[in-house]
Image: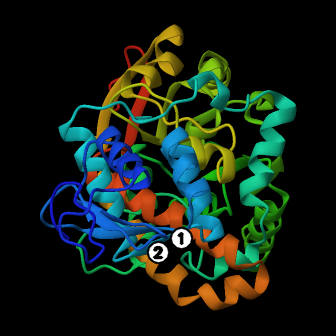
Amino acid sequence: MTAGLKARTGTPGRRASLDARLAKALLAAVGSPPIGIALWSGESFAMQDTVTATLRIRDRATLLKLLLDPERNFGDAYMDGSVEVEGDLVQLMEAGFRARQRARLPAAAGRRLPRFLDRPRSNSLANSRQNIRHHYDLGNAFYRLWLDRELAYTCAYFPTPEATLEQAQVAKMDLVCRKLRLRAGETVVEAGCGWGAFALHAALRYGARVRAFNLSREQLAFAREGARALGAADRVEFIEDDYRNITGRCDAFVSIGMLEHVGRDNYRELGRVIDRCLQNAGRGLIHSIGQDSSRPLNAWIEARIFPGAYPPTLREMMEVLEPWRFSVLDVENLRPHYALTLEHWLRRFEDAAGQVRAMYDDAFVRAWRFYLSGSLAAFRTGELQLYQVLFNRIGGNDVAG
């Protein structure tokens, strides 16, 4: 590809078409990344001398949709095959993120529609159940194809880059338990327990008694079966209910990968629940995807993958804790570990793509490839973070070592 807008049609000096000029405007609006564009007409061009990958656009309607709302419509066009990527999809997305960062453009760069049209779905009691089931009740058989054996669907912790995904997920759960100084006989409340991996880990390896809350029936069925199989049903109770309904006292309050689904309007209510539950000498840990500056989640991901989701900034996470006078003891960013986790997930997903296609369809495969690839690119480039925030009651000095 050559730099600039000279169309490569085999006719020296031929003036670029209107379509090519519109495509140039699209690239310019998103920071002029090193990405080539190949149009249905045969024209191809790039804004830089070297390109990372090339977008092949099927028709003018697709080009116009990308111009109107590149953030939302790129994912849809990839899903239905209106856009094909020649080259590595992750590297293409990384190039796009880095170009936008260099140009200091907002997350929705190039968008020509008002942002309010993409307001995230609310996380009321009724909507939260629908939002969670949209994503997590796709079927345990689907997630078994590419997650680890325990179906841990949050950032792992890699003690070495060579660790397996299974080893890294166990290391993550150990890290959380160590930070909480979890001791045998203590009571734990887990808000948003996924398929139960952490609750069972805390009970079986640390001797805790755990009450774990979740709204996904598919996940809870798997978790309860796991508890029975491991002989832990008397130590772990899996409860189908919303975090807002949690009652009872505990020594440790844990939330791993749930805050993203709470919605900022409900942060004070989550803090109220923690305050209601946590003993005076209790400790808590929130593990959440986050970001450096406040902006909505990618519009396509919110619409197609994670309805109602929002990754907070560190400052916004304090809205959970500050009104109730909790003291922050430790903050750690595990962003590189999430990038490694996603590398494993994406590799396993691609290995199982044929099975996923047979379970659903090709559009589903392409959507999840797009989601996992974009997430990997976002963590590699710093578009997203992974925060662990450890806290306790004001005046407590039981700090993790």
The 10 Å Cα crowd at callout 1, few under 14, some 14 to 19, many 20 or more, is: many
In the rendered image, the vertical position of residue 291 relative to residue 5, given as above or below: above
Q: Position of residue 367 (x, y in %)?
A: 61, 65
Camera-nearest residue between 41 and 124: 41
Q: Which mark is drawn over residue 346?
A: 2
**Residue 181 visible here:** yes
Indicate left or right for 192 with 60 as reference: right
Tag 1: residue type?
Answer: Arg
The 10 Å Cα crowd at callout 2, few under 14, some 14 to 19, many 20 or more, is: many
Q: Position of residue 185 (x, y in %)?
A: 59, 50
Q: Mark 1 points at which residue?
A: 369
Indicate left or right for 288 with 398 as reference: right
**Residue 241 visible here:** no
In the rendered image, the vertical position of residue 310 relative to residue 45, given as above or below: above
Q: Where is residue 176 in the image (x, y as percent from the top left)?
A: 43, 51
Q: Which residue is drawn at 31% across and 79% down?
A: 163
Tag 2: residue type?
Answer: Leu
Q: Quadrant of residue 253?
A: top right
Q: Which residue is drawn at 46% across and 12% down?
A: 322
Query: Are the residues tagged 2 and 1 within 8 Å (C-beta)?
Result: yes
Q: Which residue is drawn at 80% across and 53% down?
A: 133
Disc 1 element: helix
CA–CA distance in space, label 2 to label 1: 7 Å
Camera-nearest residue between 342 and 102: 102
In the rendered image, the vertical position of residue 220 relative to residue 269, given as above or below: below
Disc 2 element: helix
Count of numbered labels shown in the rendering:
2
Q: Quadrant of residue 197?
A: bottom right
The first of marks 2 and 1 along the sequence is 2
Q: Which residue is drawn at 58% across and 50% down?
A: 73
Quadrant for the N terminus in the image: bottom left
